[in-house]
Amino acid sequence: MKSTFKNKKMHPNPSSSKLFFTPTPPNDSVIKIFDSTGRTILSKPFSQEINISGIEEGVLYCKILPIIDYCLMKH
């Protein structure tokens, strides 16, 4: 499947409280955040603003399913 979600951005990175995504992916997208061991830390329907304040610090991986991968740092 070829992505039509162009010029994607996640900011700020690193972040300590909220992440923002632009532009908005398709309506049926899901955001998943994983730790370095592959354990799912967060899984929820996508929104342009995600609160990560309750997540431990470290390098985390973010997927917007079904199409996008990001790597982020939480501090």
Image (cartoon, helix red, strand yellow):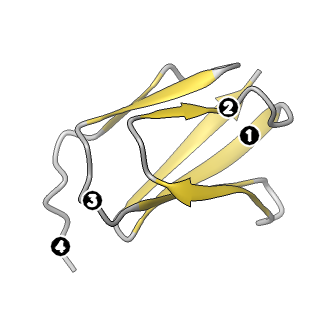
Q: What residue type is labelled 4?
A: Lys
Q: Which mark sits nearer the N-terminus, 2 or 4?
A: 4
Give the residue pinned by disc 3. Answer: 27
User: What residue is pinned by disc 4?
Assistant: 2
Q: Are marks 2 and 4 in contact (CB under 8 Å)?
A: no
Residue 46 at x, y percent in the picture: 43, 51
Q: Which residue is drawn at 81% across and 32% down?
A: 54
Q: Is label 4 in a helix, a strand or a loop?
A: loop
Q: Quadrant of the N terminus?
A: bottom left
Position of 24 compared to 44: left or right? left
Figure quadrant of the C terminus: top right
Residue 7 lies, with reference to residue 70, above or below; the image says: above
Q: Is mark 1 on a helix, strand or loop?
A: strand
Labels 1 & 3 near each other (Cβ < 8 A) = no
Q: Position of residue 74 (x, y in %)?
A: 72, 28
Q: In this view, does 60 lie above or below 18?
A: below
The kind of residue tagged 2 is: Met
How crowded pointer 3 is (Cα within 10 Å; few <14, some 14-19, many 20+) is rated as: few
Amino acid residing under circle 3: Asn
